[in-house]
Amino acid sequence: MAAMPVSSARPSGARVGVCRVGGGARAGVRTSAAASSAASSSLDLAGVSGGRVYNFSAGPACIYEDVLTTASSEMMNWENSGTSVMEMSHRGKEFMGIHAKAIADLRELLSIPDNYQVLFLQGGASLQFASIPLNLASAEDTADYVTTGSWGAKAIGEGKKFLKNANEAASTKSSGFTSIPATSEWSLSDDAKYVHICANETIQGVEFKTDVVPANGAPLIADMSSNFVSKPIDVSKYGIIYAGAQKNVGPAGLTVVIVRDDLIGNARADCPTMQNYAIMAENDSMYNTPPCYSIYMAGLVFDKLNKMGGLEAVEKVNIEKCAHIYDAIAGSDGFFNCPVDMTCRSAMNIPITIVNEDADKRAELEKAFIAEAGDLGMVALKGHRSVGGMRASIYNAMPIEGAEALAAFMKEFKAKHA
Ligand SMILES: *Cc1c(COP(=O)(O)O)cnc(C)c1O
């Protein structure tokens, strides 16, 4: 296998780090590294062309290629406005239109009921870990948290700074964050102001497969950063849904917060203005300068998802994509493993390990896997530093060909190294 780094071999000006969409071979220039590697591999990575790669990054992650093409064609002069979207006043009619359409398209996509507001905020999902208690509870109040992975652990950690009682109603930490505890096992508080879950744990690959209902009747708050708009959900089951955009939507810088009306207007007196849902809702998320370009890009994605047939259609492809990889694990006679319980395996983030009693050998094989995949144009497969191994993030914009290529590579790698 040629060891030439992809980056040094890529023609100058070619883009890195975003996967292509649309499938099938295309008359493009393959990177010389990918081409030379492919020559020593039986794999034909037809989708890797034009200097682009299959990007399995957990975030920022791949963006639909046709969305990038549209953004690129509109870069210099958006709809004859004479400026790029980045240069527009956020108070001008052009940007106000872009903003309003992005919200309308997201409302359509998720069938968001009228008694919910869509806020386009900043600070990432991480700032919401603080905004939620600041808007929904006083310092003396109680809130419940269900911890099924690293992000849920961060959410309760931040909650503890702002709440007298941030109660961990359930945690799967002792079993390595590989399952979702049944709602009947959650130790909920009668007086909880809310119940917080992480709908998809990006690092551990653990996903809630249904919309759950907490038995204490408290509003359910869900961090959906890494499975937002990946499948249909019933928004009415949630008090708040929030997501950083850089996983499944578009560029970083935008945080989408969908919040039920009755949860707006109860912020603490000392809640920072920028974190106050009521102020943001009253000002149409434009109390200050919003992340204009990220909103524009998110709007292009929401529009595309509606045109693809909505979230039923999107989910269908996502299930097919993850099945390729889970099947490759299952069919590897124990060479590969995914530690996550069958019932809650994420369709978006798939942790993969190589099974070997010899820890050094295992590390060596995993390193070889990541390097050889990289040579073939499949990048960012290294597992999170906290769990090791590999991880394939296959968000909406990862084309099915990318998942097929990875599954084919896994079979080939196993045949060579088992
Ligand atoms: C990435 C991620 C976060 C953190 O998002 P930021 O926007 O970087 O703050 C939080 N929760 C989940 C589930 C994530 O995947």
Image (tube, rainbow, N blue to C red):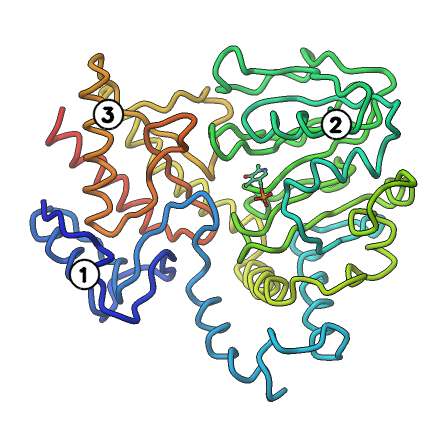
Amino acid type indicated by mark 3: Ala
In terms of sequence position, does the residue under pointer 2 or pointer 1 come before the other? 1
In the picture, which quadrant includes the N terminus?
A: top left
In terms of sequence position, does the residue under pointer 1 or pointer 3 come before the other? 1
60 with respect to 183 (left or right):
left
Q: Tell me how far mark 3 sits from mark 2, CA to CA.
A: 38 Å
Q: In this orientation, which residue lies closer to the viewer: 312 or 273?
A: 273
- The residue pinned by badge 1 equals 9
290 with respect to 113 (left or right):
left
In terms of sequence position, does the residue under pointer 3 or pointer 2 come before the other? 2
Q: Tell me how far mark 1 sits from mark 3, CA to CA.
A: 27 Å
Q: Under 8 Å from ligand 1: the CB of mark 2?
A: no
In the picture, which quadrant includes the C terminus?
A: top left
Q: Is mark 3 on a helix, strand or loop?
A: helix
Q: Do the residues labelled 2 and 1 touch (CB within 8 Å)?
A: no
Amino acid type indicated by mark 1: Ala
- The residue pinned by badge 2 equals 161
- The residue pinned by badge 3 equals 363
